[in-house]
Image (spheres, rainbow, N blue to C red):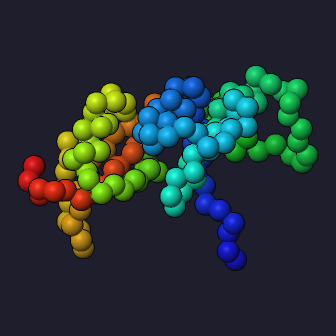
């Protein structure tokens, strides 16, 4: 089976804060929204979406469902409050890692920004990491003009 699209969406606890964060990270406005419930960023190779964890709870009059509820999937307010176990990393690639690192530092977005690091497991690569407003880890990889740290 061939899928029509590939998206990941994050259940976010502060929709506007996350929207602002990702617009700065992607240096682009959001591509599409469904009110203040859902936002989609169409980036090359991936649609990254934001789901406002509290929208449905705050607007029950707008919700129509059929079939049973499954709280482990449907209770986004509860999901947003759970500890982030950091099992999913958002991995982005750039041509100039040093330039991107400086841009992220200058924007002042993300928390726990690491220095640029090097790893070689089957193939070498350079990267740095930081967290989004909900504690989702982001790893940015790329080339360096100088392979010195």
Q: Left of 147 or right of it: where is 71? A: right
Name, please, the residue furthest toward the top. 58
Q: Nearer the viewer, residue 87 or 113?
A: 113
Q: Residue at the spot x=65%, y=32% of the render?
A: 52
Q: Residue at the spot x=45%, y=43% of the render?
A: 26
Name, please, the residue furthest toward the left. 148
Q: Using the rendered image of the protein, determine whether residue 135 is visible from the camera's viewpoint.
A: no
Q: Nearer the viewer, residue 36 or 117?
A: 36
Which image quadrant: the N terminus? bottom right
Could you tell me residue 93's position as x and y percent? 36, 56
Q: Residue at the spot x=19%, y=56% of the render?
A: 144
Please give the count of numbered marks on the rendered protein: 0
Could you tell me residue 38's position as x and y percent? 67, 38
Q: Nearer the viewer, residue 106 or 89?
A: 106
Name, please, the residue furthest toward the bottom. 1
Q: Residue at the spot x=44%, y=50% of the render?
A: 90
Quadrant of residue 10 in the image? top right
Could you tell me residue 104's position as x and y percent? 32, 36
Relative vertical location of residue 56 with respect to residue 139 in this rendering, above or below: above
Quadrant of residue 12 in the image? top right
Q: Using the rendered image of the protein, determine whether residue 11 is visible from the camera's viewpoint.
A: yes
Quadrant of residue 16 in the image? top right
Could you tell me residue 88's position as x and y percent? 46, 51
Relative vertical location of residue 85 with respect to residue 92 in this rendering, above or below: above
């Amino acid at each position: 089976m061939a899928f029509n699209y590939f998206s990941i969406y994050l259940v976010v606890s502060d929709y506007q804060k996350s929207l602002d964060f990702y617009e700065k990270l992607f240096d682009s406005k959001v591509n599409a929204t469904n009110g203040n419930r859902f936002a989609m960023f169409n980036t090359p190779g991936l649609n990254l979406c934001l789901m406002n964890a509290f929208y449905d709870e705050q607007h029950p009059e707008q919700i129509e469902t059929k079939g049973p509820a499954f709280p482990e999937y449907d209770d986004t307010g509860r999901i947003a409050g759970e500890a982030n176990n950091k099992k999913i990393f958002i991995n982005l690639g750039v041509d100039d890692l040093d330039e991107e690192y400086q841009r992220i530092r200058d924007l002042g977005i993300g928390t726990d920004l690491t220095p640029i690091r090097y790893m070689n497991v089957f193939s070498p690569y350079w990267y740095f990491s930081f967290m989004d407003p909900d504690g989702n880890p982001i790893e940015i990889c790329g080339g360096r003009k100088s392979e010195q740290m």
